[in-house]
Structure formats: C-alpha cells, structure tokens
Image (spheres, rainbow, N blue to C red):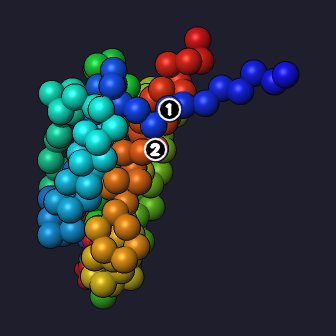
C-alpha cells in the first residue's frame, strides 16, 4: 500500500501571514475577507492571522519574503488585483509579482500562495472577488491550509 502524503483543509494549529495590496482596494478587500472567512471557517484562530498591507501588487514579494523569513508562519497568502490598463505596465507588474511570489516559496520553503487576480477588466476582477467566479482569496486560503499541513508532515 502506498504511503500517501496529503495536507488537510484545517487551520486549527496554523499561523498564517497575509500580504494584501491596497491598489484596487475595492477588489482586494473582498479577497482579504474571503481568505479570512475561509480560514476561520476551517478552525484557524483569528489571532493567528497577521495581515500586512502594501501599496500595490509589485510590493507584495518583498513583504511576503520578510514574513516567511521570520519562521513564524506556516504559510503566507499574497492577495492583489492587477487590472490591465492602456499601457504595457500590466505585463511588467504581473510578471514580477508572479515570479517574486514563487521565488519566496522556493527560497524560504514556506508555502507562499499566489492569490493575485490578473484580469483584462474590472468585471473579471469583480467576478473573482466573491461573485459568479467565486473568491480567489478564499481559494488561496484553502491552498495555504493544505500546503502548510502537508509540509508539516514531510520531515
Ligand atoms: N496597476 C496596478 C498596480 N500598479 C502599481 C504597482 O503594483 C506598484 O505599486 C507601483 O508600480 C509602485 O512600485 N498595482 C496593482 O496592485 N494593481 C494594478 O492594477
Ligand atoms: C496594471 C497597471 O499597472 C495598470 O492598471 C496601469 O494602467 P495604465 O497601463 O493605463 O497606466
């Protein structure tokens, strides 16, 4: 019989850091509330959730890395909303945020979850912040709990 290593969707003994961008706060505040609601509904103690606000998505990786390096957190959730404008700025922000968040996880070994919506327009962002396409903040919280509990199992 194979030994299956898998994480649980429970935050009972987890300490979670959240980095959230203030840019497009109308969207990111909904992602944050979705993440916190999901963590709480899966038994995460709200006192074990720390939230750091940054100006925009581009600033997420440096703060995510700082949180991960403290050794205090079982996972770090990164939340933002990057919505295409009329220049190529969108592409540079998206590329650097996604690469940066992935690099934090790989370099620190702390599960660092990419909960940044990258959309062509505001409607797509609204759809992913608690309306017809769900809440990407909630999805990120689920991934955080599973990854944190999985890594705790792998010695
Ligand atoms: N256009 C969006 C931004 N732009 C701001 C950058 O993230 C960054 O804060 C600035 O370039 C200073 O370094 N940020 C978002 O989060 N979402 C956007 O749609
Ligand atoms: C994602 C962005 O940086 C973008 O919203 C900025 O808008 P613009 O390209 O019109 O300057």
Extreme residue toward the right, this view: 1
**Quadrant where the N terminus is found in the figure:** top right
Under tag 1, what secondary structure? loop
Q: Position of residue 77 (x, y in %)?
A: 33, 43
Label placed on residue 143: 2
Extreme residue toward the bottom, this view: 86
Q: Is residue 150 above or below residue 99?
A: above
Q: Is residue 61 above or below residue 28?
A: above
45 left or right, relative to 116: left
Q: Position of residue 43 (x, y in %)?
A: 30, 32
What residue appears at the point 27 percent right and 82 percent down from the top-left corner? 122
Q: Position of residue 72 (x, y in %)?
A: 28, 19
Q: Position of residue 119 (x, y in %)?
A: 38, 76
- The front one of 20 and 46 is 46
Q: Quadrant of residue 108?
A: top left
Q: Is residue 57 above or below residue 123?
A: above
34 left or right, relative to 92: left
Q: Quadrant of residue 137?
A: bottom left
Label placed on residue 22: none
Q: Read off the residue under disc 1.
A: 8
């Amino acid at each position: 019989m194979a030994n299956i290593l898998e994480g649980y969707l429970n935050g009972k003994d987890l300490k979670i850091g959240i980095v959230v961008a203030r840019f497009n706060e109308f969207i990111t505040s909904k992602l944050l509330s979705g993440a916190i609601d999901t963590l709480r509904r899966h038994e995460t103690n709200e006192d074990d959730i720390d939230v750091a606000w940054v100006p925009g998505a581009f600033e997420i990786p440096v703060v995510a890395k700082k949180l991960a390096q403290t050794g205090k957190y079982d996972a770090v959730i990164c939340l933002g909303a990057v919505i295409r404008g009329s220049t190529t700025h969108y592409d540079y922000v998206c590329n650097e945020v996604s690469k940066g968040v992935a690099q934090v996880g790989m370099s620190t070994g702390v599960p660092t979850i990419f909960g940044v919506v990258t959309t062509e327009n505001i409607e797509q962002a609204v759809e992913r912040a608690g309306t017809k396409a769900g809440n990407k903040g909630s999805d990120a919280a689920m991934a955080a709990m599973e990854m944190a509990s999985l890594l705790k199992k792998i010695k």
